[in-house]
């Protein structure tokens, strides 16, 4: 029974539909990369340019922030470690955020950058936002989980990683002749 539908039209529609799905699947992580990359670059630059943040004490300083969360942190030893050199710790976090953001945004060493982002988010969750209740009001835990797909998949498209892989494949294939 034909039902008036030509099989070649139906196949063409399915091919287009699966092609769209495949394209969407390829680029599904791109919005996440852009969001996390821009956000982490902004967060790092904001810390580096904030005159109050990179100080051992005073309103808005990394030192006062660490002292304020020390007793409510999941791992107070992490806070104690940061308090040994709050300015150095704040600088390291800020530079780490910028490096992670750039790496993920341009797709260079994406898995490593995403792992760095996940570790930064995890450390902030275990210290600064641990006492946030309910837990889902704190942003560090969701950020940590946003990094996981990028740790697992990297940046297979629109990335320097993909460009480097393509050039290596080209060289390897050219060398095989």
Image (spheres, rainbow, N blue to C red):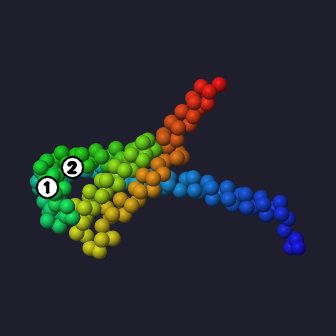
Q: Quadrant of the N terminus?
A: bottom right
Is 95 above or below relative to 169?
A: below
- In the visual, does 127 lie left or right of 148? left
Number of other residues with Cα within 10 Å of mark 2, as a class: few under 14, some 14 to 19, many 20 or more: many
Q: Residue furthest front?
A: 176
Q: CA distance from mark 2 to mark 1?
A: 13 Å
Q: Could you say which is closer to the camera, residue 48 or residue 28?
A: 28
Q: Give the mark, 2 or 1, whose residue is nearer the N terminus.
A: 1
Which numbered disc, 2 or 1, marks the residue closer to the eye? Answer: 1
- Locate residue 62, reporting x and y percent: 18, 54
Q: Residue at x 11, y 54 (%)?
A: 57
Residue 75 seen in the figure: yes
Residue 41 seen in the figure: no
Q: Quadrant of the C terminus?
A: top right
Number of marks in picture: 2
Tag 1 secondary structure = helix
Numbered tag placed on residue 90 in the rendering: 2
- Locate residue 142, reporting x and y percent: 36, 64
The residue that label 1 is drawn on is 80
Q: Residue at x 68, y 59 (%)?
A: 18
Q: Could you say which is closer to the camera, residue 10 or residue 31?
A: 10
- In the visual, does 81 lie left or right of 9? left
């Amino acid at each position: 029974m034909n039902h008036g539908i030509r099989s070649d039209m139906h196949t063409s529609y399915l091919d287009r539909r699966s092609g769209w799905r495949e394209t969407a699947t390829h680029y599904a992580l791109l919005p996440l990369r852009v969001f996390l990359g821009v956000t982490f670059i902004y967060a790092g630059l904001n810390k580096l340019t904030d005159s109050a943040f990179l100080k051992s004490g005073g309103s808005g300083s990394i030192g006062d922030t660490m002292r304020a969360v020390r007793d409510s942190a999941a791992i107070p030893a992490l806070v104690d470690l940061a308090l040994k050199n709050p300015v150095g710790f704040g600088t390291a976090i800020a530079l780490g955020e910028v490096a992670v953001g750039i790496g993920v945004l341009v797709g260079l060493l994406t898995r490593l950058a995403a792992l760095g982002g996940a570790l930064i988010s995890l450390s902030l969750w275990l210290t600064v936002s641990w006492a946030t209740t309910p837990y889902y009001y704190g942003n560090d835990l969701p950020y940590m989980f946003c990094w996981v797909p990028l740790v697992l998949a990297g940046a297979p498209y629109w990335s320097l990683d993909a460009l480097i892989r393509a050039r290596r494949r080209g060289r390897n294939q050219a060398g095989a002749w």
